[in-house]
Amino acid sequence: MADPTPVIDDLCAESEELDLLVAGLSPEQWALATPAPGWTVAHQIAHLAWTDHSSLLAVTDQDAFSREVEKALAQPGDFVDNGAQEGAGKPPPQLLADWRTGRRALADALRAAPDGARFPWYGPPMATASMATARLMETWAHGLDVADALGVARTPTDRLRHIVRLGVRTRDFAFGVHGLPTPFEEFRVELTSPSGELWLYGPEDADDRVTGTALDFCLLVTRRAHREDLALQATGPDADRWLDIAQAFAGPPGDGRPPKGTAG
């Protein structure tokens, strides 16, 4: 059983880095538009706070979380946007304080979870490490949206290893959500980390392969960049198809980002 401590530590570090980016923003900067249609910087942080709160309920109060699931089922197209809109309407200092309080409470709850615990979610139940990994992925991805709005380039770190692992493990889900048959054989994935280490997944002799940088792979599986703008290489028809549809998050794939230089 994997020790969840490293990914919880990295989740906290990722959140603190984003916190440093937004803590000193002016009201006008909180209102800047991000690449997500209709979402400002405030919406992005509000969404993280909202999802942290849902995660905390899943870990500590499963009856309350079940009621949240019922609300989601009653308004499937608007539930996430409504949560972001509600939080974005708060004054920025309150929104920032709520996000800080909620994410720290979630980290504490995850650290205190018993070995082998599994928590309900909007998709399949998740173990402690999986819950922390999902939160890290979202924090990183929505942090990119915030950075884009502010015109800031964020330096990638080896915390991406958790998102890479999640992206590899959700290969079959990506095929399924697009109604495509799941490849029978594993793929070989070889990615260069931000620190220069080579991260390897799958059998060395696999026919289908993906190579490139960990950063580009993470941008792909969080749908923060179009495949045409990334230096990822696929060998084999199934691996090639995967790079068109890969996603590491639950739910519908959405439209994703258009290639640079195109409208949309």
Image: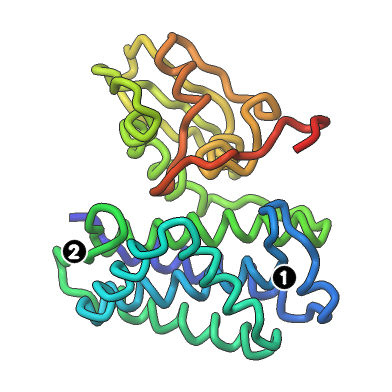
Query: Which residue is disc 2 drawn over?
Result: 118
Give the answer, above or below, for where 19 lies relative to 168.
below
Give the answer, above or below, for where 247 lies relative to 65.
above
Q: CA distance from mark 1 to mark 2?
A: 33 Å
Labelled pair 1, 2 in contact (Cβ < 8 Å): no
Looking at the rendering, in which quadrant would you find the N terminus?
A: bottom left
Q: Nearer the viewer, residue 231 or 97?
A: 97
Could you tell me residue 240's position as x and y percent?
Answer: 49, 16
Q: Please name the amino acid that badge 2 sits on.
A: Arg
Q: Please name the amino acid that badge 1 sits on.
A: Leu
Give the answer, above or below, for where 164 lies relative to 17.
above
Q: Is residue 78 left or right of residue 73?
A: right
Q: Nearer the viewer, residue 244 or 216?
A: 244
Quarter where residue 30 is shown: bottom right
Looking at the rendering, in which quadrant would you find the C terminus?
A: top right
Q: Is residue 242 left or right of residue 47?
A: left
Q: Residues within 10 Å of mark 1 (few under 14, many from 20)?
A: some
Q: Residues within 10 Å of mark 2 (few under 14, many from 20)?
A: some
| Label whose residue precedes the other's in the sequence (1 or 2) | 1
Could you tell me residue 108's position as x and y percent?
Answer: 35, 81
Residue at the image point whose x is 36% and y is 9% from the top: 207
Query: Which residue is disc 1 drawn over?
Result: 21
Considering every residue shown, the one lying at the far front of the view is: 74
Q: Secondary structure at mark 2?
A: strand
Residue at the image point whose x is 64% and y is 69% from the top: 43
Mark nearest the camera among 1 and 2 is: 2
Residue at the image point whose x is 26% and y is 61% from the top: 3
Q: How many marks?
A: 2
